[in-house]
Structure formats: structure tokens, C-alpha cells
Amino acid sequence: MLGDRAEVLGAAIAGMHYNIPIIHLYGGDVTQGGTDESTRHAISKIANLHLTSNFQSYKNVKQMGEESWRIRNVGLSSLDLFRDNFFKSKTYLEQKFKIDLSKPLILLIQHSVTWQVQESKKQILKTLSALNKLKIQTIAVYPCSDPGYKEIINEYNKFKKKKFFKVYKNLEINDFYSLLKYSKLLLGNSSCGILECGFFKKYAINLGIRQEGRLCKKNVFHLPHQSSTIARKISEIIKKPDIKNKILVYGNGNSSKKIIKLILKNYSEEKLKRKKFVI
């Protein structure tokens, strides 16, 4: 089971009551922006094995009273996808999305915040106001379905009349990460800005509290929902030189081998199921 969504918690509860051992990916991560935080930690206490995305999360799960032998730091599994043959060409992207990759490109992913649902419209308007000042070509992707998402989509649909702005309900995974590869920055509050942008040697502007507490490096800039502040930081980043080296906080793209090795290990099912709290 992966992550921190409510439907995953439901599956974890069912698995526990049916005595089915559970492997949980990415427990111990911290995001102070909504109910996902509590859900993630609840799944960790139900799960029987823990595969964390970084060493700090490993320590967080251990601090929750989990036995050390149950925890392994494997890194972020999505990074394993990114081999050279995974990406689309610049020509393909320019033709499909009607963009010019010789100029700066911004990717925008902004979700609602489950602890600030009533602020969703106000928050996205601040972001769009900043983009309107700069008029840099931007591709936006619809938010996830957390409460408040409709307000964001409504504002996108009004804003898409702008020539520099395009919005998509969803993008194929190869297309999205290829666009990220050739973009200048990712804007919004998606976990991608923190988890994967460093691996892609990209800057990210993280807005508000949704990802608050996630482990990150200096390629990520944390800003409030203020249009002038956002516009100023975008302008600064556009002038910055590209990042030279990958930031490997979440692994080096070799998680799959570690996960398979763990799954194939000859665990005692009885030992897996009988959890205990340790100090």
C-alpha cells in the first residue's frame, strides 16, 4: 500500500482484520497541510513492513514504536522510471502541446488543502495573478479531487483564454515528466515539487502549507499565497542558471531492486502479524 490517501487507510484496516500482512510505502513522511498527515501515520501503525522514501522518514517510523527489522529505507520508487528511453523528444512536446521549449516553461500543479478548503479559490487566484503579471508560457494540470478542487478548476477554465496558459485534465506519465525535464520550474503545492524535482535538477516553488514538513533541499522555495511574492520569485528563478547536479534526497532511482529483495525475503507470517510497540 502506498502513501496517505483515505482509501488506502480503508484497505489497511480490512487487511489487518483479515490477517493479511501489509507493506506500506512512504510512511514517516511529513506533510502538515491536511488530513493526509494523520492518515499516513495511521496506516504505518497498521502495516507490518515499512518502506520509507528517505532516511529521516525511516527514523520517524522507528520513533513511532515500530521494530527496526520491519523498516527499510528504499527511496522513491517513481525515480526508477526515469531512464533515457522514458522521455519524449523536444520536437514531440512542442508539436503536441504547442509550446516553444527554447523559452522558459512553467508547470503548475496546485491542489486544495483539506485544512483550508474555504481558501481554495483565493489561493489559486493569487497564483494566477502572479502568472498574469509575467506571461511566461505555463502548462497547468487539474488538481486532485480533495474538497475545494472545483473552485480551482473553475478559475483555470476562466484563465485558459490567456495565450500563454494551457490547462489539461490529466497528462500521460511520459508526457508530464518529459515536460518537467525541459521546464524551468514547477509551481504549486504538489509533492512532485519536493520529491522529484531535485532528481530532475529543477527548481520548485512550493505554495502554502500542503507540503509543510517534507524533507527538501535548496532547489525548493517555500512561499505564502501572495501574488507579488510569487511573481518576484518566478522572475528570480528564470534568471538563475540550471542546477548542475541531481539532488538525491529520495534515492538514486534504484528502489525496485531493494523492494523486490524485501518481498522475496522468507519472513515468518506469524512474526509479521504479531506487532508490538518498542522503545
Image (cartoon, rainbow, N blue to C red):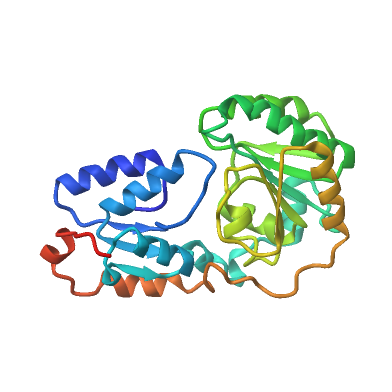
Residue at the front extreme of this rendering:
279
The answer to whether residue 189 is above or below residue 248 is above
Q: How many numbered marks are there?
A: 0
Task: Give the image location of residue 219, x and y in percent.
Answer: 71, 62
Question: Left or right: where does residue 112 sit relative to residue 183?
Answer: left
Residue drawn at (64%, 60%) of the image = 197
Mark yes or no: residue 6 visible: yes
The answer to whether residue 30 is above or below residue 5 is below
Residue drawn at (38%, 43%) of the image = 39
Q: Quadrant of the C terminus?
A: bottom left
Residue 116: image quadrant is top right
Question: Left or right: where does residue 162 sit relative to residue 276?
Answer: right
Question: Left or right: where does residue 205 sit relative to residue 27?
Answer: right
Task: Give the image location of residue 71, x and y in percent.
Answer: 33, 68
Residue 229: image quadrant is top right
Residue drawn at (75%, 74%) of the image = 244
Task: Give the image location of residue 157, x and y in percent.
Answer: 71, 27
The answer to whether residue 74 is above or below residue 11 is below
Mark yes or no: residue 54 visible: no
User: Between residues 207 and 169, which one lies in front from this camera angle?
Assistant: 207
Residue at the left extreme of this rendering:
270
Task: Give the image location of residue 238, x and y in percent.
Answer: 85, 56
